[in-house]
Image: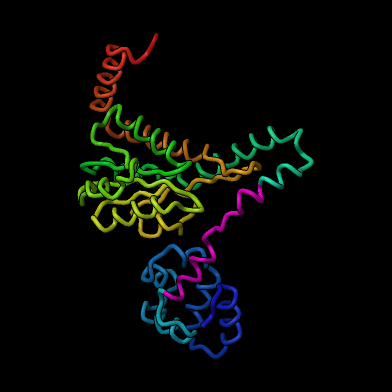
């Protein structure tokens, strides 16, 4: 059984002329549309390839796999990004000869991240907002560096919707907090590679409890994205040692703005009341 996508591709090419016309059609689609195979269901792949789903199962077995899921895992592994260790990036940064242009290079990378993220989520933002609006309660989770993104999303959202909460896991209470996730809720999880164990646990709990999962992440095949109802992708390229979260923050802010627009006049009234209360209680010095 092939262990990597490259081994699979080599096997398909070597045996292609031996395959039946139906299998040839399916195999050609797998190699020509590898990214789609990683993120689509088997039925959707079969529909796009114009073959029967059963043919994909039999093709998988013919190529040495127990079934479709095992074959598809090679496509998932191919697409999933493995980040370069921070230490390696830091050494390159310290040894680099472009220190004088670093600030400029960083800003250019941030701009590119924003452009790429906007292109990825042209439709997804509106779809995610509609899903969240229908939920009885919205849970939000982000850990380690993604905590700031999650906190900012909750802060803005709660200004006009009280039924929003942050799953933070402080004091080792994450498992207790997960018990509040219900089937009539939605759960937003924010994470990028290497994906935090806590984020994966929240995503797993959301699916177990029937909550609608919205993943804000860096890959359509990240552990929190594979079974999500809606996936929003952000780019985090950076010449620095640590990935950039500017685009993730922009995505979260855009989602909150989209939600306010969807809610309309009622949300504006809630926001106005919250703003008045903050001023009245002395939250601001001016």
Residue 187 x %, y %? 31, 47
- Quadrant where the C terminus sits is top left
Q: How many marks?
A: 0
Q: Is residue 140 visible?
A: no
Residue 280: quadrant of the picture: top left
**Furthest residue in direction bottom, as rendered:** 18
Left or right of 184 on screen, residue 45 = right
Examine the rendered structure and indicate whether residue 47 appears above or below residue 199. below
User: Position of 44 compared to 120: left or right?
Assistant: left
Q: Percent x, y for residue 36?
A: 47, 64
70 to 240, vertically: above or below: below
Res. 268 image quadrant: top left
- Does 152 appear above or below 187? above
Most frequent secondary structure within the magenta stretch: helix
Residue lying at the far right of the rendered structure: 97
The image position of residue 58, as x and y in percent, is 41, 84
Q: Position of residue 198 (x, y in %)?
A: 38, 51
Magenta stretch? Answer: 70-89
Per the image, is 72 magenta?
Answer: yes
Q: Along the line of sight, which residue is nearer the eye, 4 or 112?
A: 4
In the displayed structure, would residue 257 be above or below residue 80? above
Name the residue: 41% across, 46% down: 190
Judging from the image, the colouring scheme is rainbow
- On the question of residue 158 being in view, the answer is yes
Q: Is residue 282 magenta?
A: no
Identity of the residue drawn at 48% across and 49% down: 192
Residue sitting at x 26%, y 27%:
267
> 280 left or right of 149?
left
**Residue drawn at (33%, 45%) of the image:** 172
């Amino acid at each position: 059984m092939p262990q990597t996508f490259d081994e699979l591709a080599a096997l398909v090419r070597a045996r292609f002329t031996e395959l039946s016309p139906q299998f040839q059609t399916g195999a050609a689609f797998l190699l020509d549309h590898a990214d789609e195979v990683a993120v689509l269901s088997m039925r959707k792949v079969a529909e796009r390839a114009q073959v029967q789903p059963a043919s994909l199962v039999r093709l998988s077995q013919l190529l040495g796999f127990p079934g479709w899921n095992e074959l598809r895992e090679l496509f998932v592994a191919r697409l999933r990004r493995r980040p370069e260790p921070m230490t390696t990036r830091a050494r390159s940064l310290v040894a680099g000869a472009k220190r004088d242009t670093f600030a400029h290079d960083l800003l250019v990378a941030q701009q590119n991240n924003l452009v790429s993220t906007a292109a990825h989520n042209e439709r997804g933002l509106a779809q995610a907002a509609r899903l969240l609006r229908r939920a009885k309660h919205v849970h939000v989770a982000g850990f380690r560096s993604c905590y700031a993104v999650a906190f900012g999303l909750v802060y803005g959202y709660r200004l006009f919707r009280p039924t929003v909460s942050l799953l933070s896991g402080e004091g080792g209470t994450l498992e207790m907090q997960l018990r509040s996730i219900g089937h009539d809720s939605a759960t937003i999880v924010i994470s990028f590679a290497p994906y935090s164990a806590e984020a994966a646990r929240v995503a797993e709990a959301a699916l177990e409890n029937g909550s609608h999962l919205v993943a804000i992440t860096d890959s359509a095949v990240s552990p929190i994205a594979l079974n999500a109802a809606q996936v929003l992708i952000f780019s985090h390229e950076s010449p620095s040692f640590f990935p950039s979260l500017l685009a993730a923050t922009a995505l979260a802010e855009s989602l909150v703005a989209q939600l306010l627009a969807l809610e309309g006049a009622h949300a504006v009234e809630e926001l106005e009341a919250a703003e008045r209360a903050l001023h009245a209680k002395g939250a601001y010095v001016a």
